[in-house]
Protein backbone atom coordinates (compact mmCIF):
# COMPACT_ATOMS: atom_id res chain seq x y z
CA UNK A 1 0.00 0.00 0.00
CA UNK A 2 2.96 2.30 0.61
CA UNK A 3 3.91 2.42 -3.07
CA UNK A 4 0.30 3.06 -4.07
CA UNK A 5 0.01 5.95 -1.63
CA UNK A 6 3.27 7.44 -2.90
CA UNK A 7 1.98 7.21 -6.47
CA UNK A 8 -1.34 8.82 -5.54
CA UNK A 9 0.44 11.60 -3.66
CA UNK A 10 2.83 12.30 -6.54
CA UNK A 11 0.01 12.49 -9.10
CA UNK A 12 -2.55 14.42 -7.05
CA UNK A 13 -0.10 17.06 -5.83
CA UNK A 14 1.61 17.31 -9.22
CA UNK A 15 0.94 20.19 -11.67
CA UNK A 16 -1.58 18.12 -13.63
CA UNK A 17 -3.46 17.03 -10.51
CA UNK A 18 -5.06 18.86 -7.60
CA UNK A 19 -8.54 18.01 -8.87
CA UNK A 20 -11.49 19.17 -6.81
CA UNK A 21 -14.92 17.74 -6.12
CA UNK A 22 -16.27 14.24 -6.58
CA UNK A 23 -14.88 14.09 -10.14
CA UNK A 24 -11.39 13.99 -8.60
CA UNK A 25 -11.99 10.37 -7.59
CA UNK A 26 -12.34 9.10 -11.16
CA UNK A 27 -9.57 11.34 -12.52
CA UNK A 28 -7.11 10.23 -9.86
CA UNK A 29 -8.05 6.57 -10.26
CA UNK A 30 -7.49 6.78 -14.02
CA UNK A 31 -4.18 8.63 -13.74
CA UNK A 32 -2.82 6.30 -11.05
CA UNK A 33 -4.38 3.14 -12.54
CA UNK A 34 -6.04 2.13 -9.30
CA UNK A 35 -9.64 1.41 -8.39
CA UNK A 36 -11.99 4.32 -7.71
CA UNK A 37 -12.54 2.94 -4.23
CA UNK A 38 -8.80 3.14 -3.52
CA UNK A 39 -8.63 6.69 -4.87
CA UNK A 40 -11.69 7.73 -2.86
CA UNK A 41 -10.36 6.31 0.40
CA UNK A 42 -7.04 8.09 -0.12
CA UNK A 43 -8.69 11.42 -1.00
CA UNK A 44 -10.79 11.27 2.16
CA UNK A 45 -7.56 11.59 4.14
CA UNK A 46 -6.35 14.64 2.22
CA UNK A 47 -7.09 17.91 3.96
CA UNK A 48 -6.65 19.91 0.77
CA UNK A 49 -9.30 17.90 -1.09
CA UNK A 50 -11.77 18.20 1.78
CA UNK A 51 -11.22 21.92 2.36
CA UNK A 52 -11.63 22.87 -1.29
CA UNK A 53 -14.73 20.86 -2.04
CA UNK A 54 -16.71 23.37 -4.14
CA UNK A 55 -20.06 24.71 -3.02
CA UNK A 56 -23.06 24.05 -5.31
CA UNK A 57 -23.29 26.38 -8.30
CA UNK A 58 -26.85 27.53 -8.88
CA UNK A 59 -26.33 30.87 -10.60
CA UNK A 60 -26.38 30.74 -14.44
CA UNK A 61 -23.32 32.30 -16.08
CA UNK A 62 -23.91 34.54 -19.12
CA UNK A 63 -21.97 33.99 -22.31
CA UNK A 64 -19.62 36.51 -23.91
CA UNK A 65 -19.95 37.80 -27.45
CA UNK A 66 -16.19 37.60 -28.07
CA UNK A 67 -15.60 34.47 -30.14
CA UNK A 68 -12.31 35.16 -31.94
CA UNK A 69 -9.07 34.35 -30.07
CA UNK A 70 -6.59 37.18 -29.45
CA UNK A 71 -9.23 39.89 -29.85
CA UNK A 72 -9.84 40.68 -26.18
CA UNK A 73 -7.65 39.77 -23.21
CA UNK A 74 -7.94 40.47 -19.48
CA UNK A 75 -4.81 41.07 -17.39
CA UNK A 76 -4.23 41.40 -13.66
CA UNK A 77 -1.58 41.03 -10.95
CA UNK A 78 -1.76 38.17 -8.46
CA UNK A 79 0.00 38.81 -5.15
CA UNK A 80 1.94 35.75 -3.96
CA UNK A 81 4.40 34.94 -1.14
CA UNK A 82 7.90 36.30 -1.69
CA UNK A 83 9.93 33.70 -3.58
CA UNK A 84 13.65 34.40 -3.98
CA UNK A 85 15.25 32.85 -7.05
CA UNK A 86 18.82 33.72 -8.11
CA UNK A 87 18.90 36.82 -5.89
CA UNK A 88 15.58 38.06 -7.30
CA UNK A 89 12.55 38.17 -5.01
CA UNK A 90 9.34 37.59 -6.92
CA UNK A 91 6.19 39.00 -5.30
CA UNK A 92 3.58 38.92 -8.06
CA UNK A 93 2.46 36.99 -11.10
CA UNK A 94 1.18 38.91 -14.12
CA UNK A 95 -1.80 36.91 -15.36
CA UNK A 96 -3.45 37.14 -18.79
CA UNK A 97 -6.55 35.34 -20.12
CA UNK A 98 -7.87 35.27 -23.69
CA UNK A 99 -11.64 35.80 -23.45
CA UNK A 100 -12.68 33.68 -26.43
CA UNK A 101 -10.54 30.57 -25.88
CA UNK A 102 -9.95 30.93 -22.13
CA UNK A 103 -6.23 30.35 -22.82
CA UNK A 104 -4.16 31.50 -19.86
CA UNK A 105 -0.58 32.61 -19.27
CA UNK A 106 1.38 34.08 -16.39
CA UNK A 107 4.80 35.59 -15.74
CA UNK A 108 6.47 36.18 -12.34
CA UNK A 109 7.55 39.74 -11.53
CA UNK A 110 9.32 41.37 -8.60
CA UNK A 111 7.30 44.60 -8.34
CA UNK A 112 4.29 46.55 -9.61
CA UNK A 113 6.50 48.92 -11.61
CA UNK A 114 4.87 49.60 -14.99
CA UNK A 115 8.18 49.06 -16.78
CA UNK A 116 8.53 45.54 -15.38
CA UNK A 117 4.86 44.81 -16.10
CA UNK A 118 5.36 45.92 -19.72
CA UNK A 119 8.42 43.67 -20.00
CA UNK A 120 6.43 40.73 -18.61
CA UNK A 121 3.65 41.37 -21.14
CA UNK A 122 6.25 41.24 -23.89
CA UNK A 123 7.44 37.83 -22.66
CA UNK A 124 3.88 36.48 -22.54
CA UNK A 125 3.07 37.70 -26.04
CA UNK A 126 6.17 36.04 -27.47
CA UNK A 127 4.63 32.68 -26.56
CA UNK A 128 1.20 31.35 -27.58
CA UNK A 129 -0.88 34.49 -26.98
CA UNK A 130 -0.51 37.42 -29.38
CA UNK A 131 -1.04 41.13 -28.81
CA UNK A 132 -4.83 41.59 -28.69
CA UNK A 133 -7.01 44.31 -30.15
CA UNK A 134 -8.22 45.18 -26.65
CA UNK A 135 -6.68 44.58 -23.22
CA UNK A 136 -8.92 44.93 -20.16
CA UNK A 137 -7.14 45.82 -16.92
CA UNK A 138 -8.00 47.37 -13.56
CA UNK A 139 -7.39 50.99 -12.63
CA UNK A 140 -4.05 50.33 -10.92
CA UNK A 141 -0.99 52.43 -11.75
CA UNK A 142 0.92 49.29 -12.73
CA UNK A 143 -0.99 49.32 -16.03
CA UNK A 144 -0.24 52.98 -16.76
CA UNK A 145 2.95 54.69 -17.91
CA UNK A 146 5.22 52.29 -19.80
CA UNK A 147 2.42 49.72 -20.19
CA UNK A 148 0.16 52.25 -21.93
CA UNK A 149 2.97 53.24 -24.31
CA UNK A 150 3.84 49.59 -25.05
CA UNK A 151 0.22 48.74 -25.85
CA UNK A 152 -0.02 51.77 -28.14
CA UNK A 153 3.12 50.63 -29.98
CA UNK A 154 1.37 47.31 -30.70
CA UNK A 155 -1.94 48.96 -31.70
CA UNK A 156 -3.68 47.50 -28.65
CA UNK A 157 -6.44 49.53 -27.05
CA UNK A 158 -6.69 49.51 -23.28
CA UNK A 159 -9.85 49.51 -21.19
CA UNK A 160 -9.61 50.20 -17.48
CA UNK A 161 -12.23 48.76 -15.14
CA UNK A 162 -13.86 51.04 -12.60
CA UNK A 163 -12.37 50.96 -9.11
CA UNK A 164 -14.03 48.39 -6.84
CA UNK A 165 -16.04 47.04 -9.78
CA UNK A 166 -14.77 43.49 -10.18
CA UNK A 167 -17.32 42.19 -12.66
CA UNK A 168 -15.38 43.67 -15.57
CA UNK A 169 -12.35 41.55 -14.63
CA UNK A 170 -14.26 38.43 -13.57
CA UNK A 171 -12.56 35.99 -15.95
CA UNK A 172 -8.96 36.83 -15.05
CA UNK A 173 -9.88 37.06 -11.35
CA UNK A 174 -11.36 33.56 -11.54
CA UNK A 175 -8.08 32.42 -13.10
CA UNK A 176 -6.17 34.12 -10.28
CA UNK A 177 -8.24 32.24 -7.71
CA UNK A 178 -7.70 28.88 -9.38
CA UNK A 179 -4.00 29.54 -9.93
CA UNK A 180 -3.50 30.51 -6.28
CA UNK A 181 -5.34 27.39 -5.12
CA UNK A 182 -3.10 25.17 -7.25
CA UNK A 183 0.09 26.88 -6.12
CA UNK A 184 -0.90 27.13 -2.45
CA UNK A 185 -2.23 23.57 -2.44
CA UNK A 186 1.28 22.28 -3.06
CA UNK A 187 2.69 24.60 -0.39
CA UNK A 188 0.06 23.52 2.14
CA UNK A 189 0.86 19.88 1.46
CA UNK A 190 4.59 20.45 2.00
CA UNK A 191 3.92 22.35 5.22
CA UNK A 192 1.57 19.64 6.50
CA UNK A 193 4.36 17.11 5.93
CA UNK A 194 6.81 19.28 7.87
CA UNK A 195 5.09 21.96 10.00
CA UNK A 196 8.46 23.37 11.08
CA UNK A 197 9.15 24.70 7.57
CA UNK A 198 7.20 27.30 5.62
CA UNK A 199 7.08 26.65 1.89
CA UNK A 200 7.10 29.69 -0.42
CA UNK A 201 8.12 28.13 -3.71
CA UNK A 202 5.86 28.99 -6.63
CA UNK A 203 7.89 30.47 -9.51
CA UNK A 204 9.28 27.08 -10.50
CA UNK A 205 5.83 25.47 -10.53
CA UNK A 206 4.05 28.38 -12.25
CA UNK A 207 4.62 27.27 -15.90
CA UNK A 208 3.62 23.68 -15.07
CA UNK A 209 0.40 24.71 -13.33
CA UNK A 210 -0.57 27.09 -16.15
CA UNK A 211 0.10 24.36 -18.73
CA UNK A 212 -2.07 21.94 -16.74
CA UNK A 213 -4.93 24.47 -16.61
CA UNK A 214 -4.72 25.01 -20.37
CA UNK A 215 -5.02 21.26 -20.80
CA UNK A 216 -8.35 21.12 -18.91
CA UNK A 217 -11.64 21.69 -20.74
CA UNK A 218 -13.21 25.07 -19.93
CA UNK A 219 -16.88 25.04 -18.92
CA UNK A 220 -17.59 28.10 -21.08
CA UNK A 221 -16.42 26.46 -24.31
CA UNK A 222 -16.30 22.73 -23.60
CA UNK A 223 -12.80 22.73 -25.13
CA UNK A 224 -9.26 22.69 -23.84
CA UNK A 225 -7.85 26.25 -24.04
CA UNK A 226 -4.68 24.95 -25.72
CA UNK A 227 -6.87 23.67 -28.59
CA UNK A 228 -9.35 26.57 -28.64
CA UNK A 229 -6.61 29.19 -29.03
CA UNK A 230 -5.69 27.66 -32.41
CA UNK A 231 -9.17 28.17 -33.87
CA UNK A 232 -10.49 31.23 -35.68
CA UNK A 233 -13.90 31.03 -34.00
CA UNK A 234 -14.87 29.56 -30.64
CA UNK A 235 -18.49 28.93 -29.64
CA UNK A 236 -19.53 29.61 -26.05
CA UNK A 237 -22.25 27.93 -24.04
CA UNK A 238 -25.00 30.37 -23.10
CA UNK A 239 -25.05 29.22 -19.49
CA UNK A 240 -24.50 26.26 -17.20
CA UNK A 241 -27.87 24.70 -16.40
CA UNK A 242 -28.54 23.93 -12.75
CA UNK A 243 -30.62 20.98 -11.58
CA UNK A 244 -33.05 23.26 -9.74
CA UNK A 245 -33.37 26.70 -8.22
CA UNK A 246 -32.45 27.47 -4.64
CA UNK A 247 -34.92 29.65 -2.81
CA UNK A 248 -33.72 32.51 -0.59
CA UNK A 249 -34.96 30.84 2.59
CA UNK A 250 -32.98 27.67 1.90
CA UNK A 251 -29.53 27.16 3.29
CA UNK A 252 -26.76 25.76 1.13
CA UNK A 253 -24.73 23.37 3.27
CA UNK A 254 -21.59 21.58 2.26
CA UNK A 255 -20.79 18.40 4.09
CA UNK A 256 -17.43 16.70 3.99
CA UNK A 257 -17.29 13.26 2.42
CA UNK A 258 -15.64 11.86 5.50
CA UNK A 259 -13.60 12.76 8.56
CA UNK A 260 -10.80 15.19 7.82
CA UNK A 261 -7.28 14.21 8.72
CA UNK A 262 -4.84 17.00 9.43
CA UNK A 263 -2.08 14.92 7.91
CA UNK A 264 -1.69 13.66 4.38
CA UNK A 265 -0.77 10.12 3.50
Image (cartoon, rainbow, N blue to C red):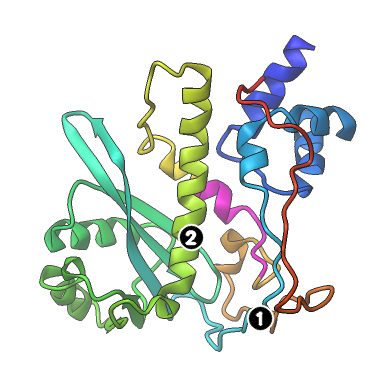
Q: Relative to 235, does residue 250 appear above or below in the rendering?
A: above
Q: Nearer the viewer, residue 244 or 182?
A: 244
Q: Quadrant of the N terminus?
A: top right
Splitting the image into 4 quarters, where does residue 147 fall? Answer: bottom left
Q: Is residue 18 left or right of residue 80?
A: right
Q: Nearer the viewer, mark 2 or mark 1?
A: 2
Q: Nearer the viewer, residue 210 or 89?
A: 89
Disc 2 secondary structure class: helix
Residue that lies at the very extreme toward the bottom in this rendered image: 65
N-terminal of the pair, mark 2 or mark 1, is 2
Magenta region includes residue 218: yes
Residue receiving disc 2? 175
Splitting the image into 4 quarters, where does residue 86 fall? Answer: top left
Q: Relative to 57, does residue 37 appear above or below in the rendering?
A: above
Magenta region includes residue 95: no
The image's mark for residue 235 is 1
Range of residues picked out in magenta:
210-219
Residue 142 appears at what percent x and percent y? 18, 65
Residue 205 appears at what percent x and percent y? 44, 37
Q: Is residue 166 left or right of residue 227?
A: left
Point 14% across, 63% down: residue: 114
Splitting the image into 4 quarters, where does residue 24 fall? Answer: top right
Q: Is residue 189 left or right of residue 249?
A: left
Point 44% across, 57% down: residue: 176
Residue 151 appears at what percent x and percent y? 22, 76
Disc 1 secondary structure class: loop
Q: Quadrant of the C terminus?
A: top right
Amino acid sequence: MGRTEDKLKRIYYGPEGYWKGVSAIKKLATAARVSEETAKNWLKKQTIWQVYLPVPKYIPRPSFTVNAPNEVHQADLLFLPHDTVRRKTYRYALTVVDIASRYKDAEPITSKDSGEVAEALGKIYKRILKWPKLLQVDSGTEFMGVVTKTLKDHSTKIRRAEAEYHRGQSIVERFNKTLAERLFGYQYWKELEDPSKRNKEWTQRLPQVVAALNNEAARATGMKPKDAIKKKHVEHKSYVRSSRAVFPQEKKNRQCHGPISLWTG
